[in-house]
Image: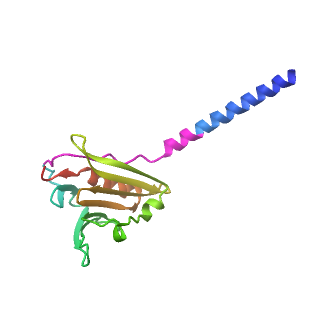
Amino acid sequence: MDSVRRWRKAAFITFFGLLACSGAYLCLVALNKPLPPPILVLSACKSPSSSMQRIQVGESYSFFATANEFVCREQMDDTPPFTERFCLKPKSGGSALVFSIHDSDGVYGAPSDPTLVLSEYSEKRHVVDATGSVIGQDSWGYWDRDKYWRKIHLHGINAKYGPVAKSEAKNYDQILSSACFSNP
């Protein structure tokens, strides 16, 4: 009888010890998970500071970037669907934040997204206006916690970057967070 009590006590202590260790591990994993970029809430554009460059994308949307840190290039595809793109590149870097007008979603309408497939983590969220109405979709994620990507789709335009380093993603997220309605 005494040995049964000892066995139960040892099993009880072992079980709760493992439960506590598992809980501590899950908390550690949750604390090390990268924070998502801010949720986009669009409203009418305000006057930017003198150091900011306005980037008009399509007829309805504008973004703002620091003029002395980024270079903006424009290009147009020469085959259908004739996508117009604006590439915003840091003056000291090789990556780009790409804005596309009427971008196709893949070959013959079939989505093909290796960035999403190869991600360690990804998430989709809504883009909303100031009243809370859904006006688009925001997808983001990372590869091995050191390469980040993000894709935003609003009516008629797309914006995307990545995979890029965390510091570049932070800079691009600031630009994407500046999104506003140029013609409310």
Residue 28 picture quarter: top right
Q: Residue at x 59, y 36 (%)?
A: 23
Is residue 86 rendered magenta in the image?
no
Q: Where residue 150 sits in the image (x, y, percent)?
A: 36, 56
Q: Residue at x 34, y 57 (%)?
A: 151
Q: Which residues are magenta?
A: 25-46
Residue 21 picture quarter: top right
Residue 21 is left or right of residue 141, and the answer is right
Q: Residue at x 25, y 72 (%)?
A: 81
Residue 160 is left or right of residue 60, and the answer is right
Q: Where residue 76 sits in the image (x, y, percent)?
A: 22, 73
Question: Of residues 27 and 71, which is closer to you in this image?
Answer: 27
Question: Of residues 71 and 57, which is closer to you in this image?
Answer: 57
Q: Where residue 184 sits in the image (x, y, percent)?
A: 13, 49
Question: Of residues 70 and 16, which is closer to you in this image?
Answer: 16
Q: Is residue 43 above or below residue 157?
A: above
Q: Residue furthest bottom?
A: 78
Colouring: rainbow
Question: Of residues 126 and 62, which is closer to you in this image?
Answer: 126
Is residue 45 rendered magenta in the image?
yes
Q: Residue furthest top?
A: 1
Residue 10 is left or right of residue 162, and the answer is right
Total numbered circles: 0
- Quadrant containing the N terminus is top right
Q: Is residue 151 above or below residue 85?
A: above
